[in-house]
Amino acid sequence: MRKRKSLTEFKKGVLAGDRVVLSQAITLVESNLETDSKLAGDLVQELLPYAGNSIRVGITGVPGVGKSTFIESFGKMLVDKGKKVAVLAVDPSSQKTKGSILGDKTRMEKLASDKRAFIRPSPSGSTLGGVSSKTREAMLICEAAGFDVILVETVGVGQSEIAVKGMVDFFLLLMLSGAGDELQGIKKGIMEMADGMLINKADGDNLQPAKKAKATYQNALHLFPLGENNWSPQVLIGSSISGMGLPECWQMIEDFQSKMLGNGFWEKNRAEQRLKWLDDSIQALLGRAFYMHTAIQKKLNEGKKQVLEGELNPMNLARELTSHFLKK
């Protein structure tokens, strides 16, 4: 059996940008084994002084918008600008399918083969909170390894967008022109979270509809009051195939960073995210301890039958179980 690396070896390898050690370090923080948790926590603690120097960009979009193609083209453009790019993903559905959302990097072959880029499939976990926490730690490790830009992809719809918004500096929403209701983003409330929008696949016959959609979305965004950061989100059009609009997208993100650093919101936002991470971590650890408790498991299995039959109020069972757990 191969000997596991020590804390010093992990730290040294990550700071040196060793890709193998970087992957092993992220595997360590993703592990659910108790024996790994302590070392993982100590490693992240050791790397904290070296993290935080990247721009963290969350990327979400409607189904079929071409996120993977966009991320690959956008990432390639950034590495050609001299940036080091890491791509992570938050996929709460991977627990059900047991699959890796980034498909073992096969969806982004060109970017994955570039030594200036690092692509990591979504971690597995029993809860979205667990997946999010692991992604946060992976992000810090990548920053300590010298990556300038962290792209975090959301997968599916719903809570993953909220989770990613809570761990990034800039949240980019990719849209399609003419994909059903032009204002579908407003219905989901995702538009309100976006710091910028890009209407993708704006090439060929889609160019004119994309320009029309841009005006529609821009008008819609004007209806929203400015947020605490006093930033007015922009709407761009772009093509992952031709590369049109991608430089403008990066310029928008840099302009955002400059303004947020200037008005103090950049660090304020990150500080609030760290507190949210603390809350999420406490809930995740308490939940894990609760469900692993032998007596709780027995009582829960017995009570579930009554809940399923409609004979027992779920809240009453929850109160009884938590009361028993707190008295242990």
Image (cartoon, helix red, strand yellow):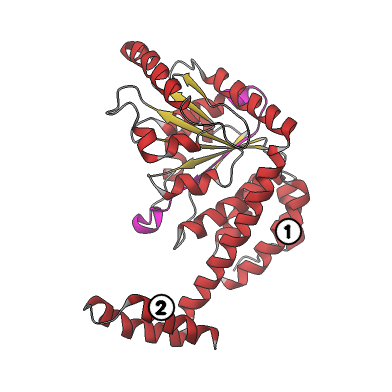
Q: Quadrant of the C terminus?
A: bottom right
- Secondary structure type for disc 2: helix
The image shows residue 43 at horizontal and vertical percentages of 71, 59
Question: Residue 139 or 217: which is nearer the viewer?
Answer: 217
The 10 Å Cα crowd at callout 2, few under 14, some 14 to 19, many 20 or more, is few
Q: Which residue is mark 1?
A: 45
The image shows residue 29 at horizontal and vertical percentages of 60, 59
The image shows residue 142 at horizontal and vertical percentages of 65, 45
Please report the bounds of the magenta region as a residue range.
77-98
> Which residue of the protein is positioned furthest toward the left in this rendering?
309
Q: Is residue 224 visible?
A: yes
The image shows residue 205 at horizontal and vertical percentages of 31, 12
Q: Quadrant of the N terminus?
A: bottom right
Disc 1 to disc 2, C-alpha distance: 35 Å
- How many marks overall? 2
Q: Between tags 1 and 2, which lies in front?
A: 2
Residue at image point 69% right, 57% down: 44
Question: Residue 122 or 16: which is nearer the viewer?
Answer: 122
Amino acid at pointer 2: Ala
Q: Is residue 146 visible?
A: no
Amino acid at pointer 1: Gln
Horizontally, residue 152 falls left or right of residue 256, namely left
Q: Which residue is mark 2?
A: 318
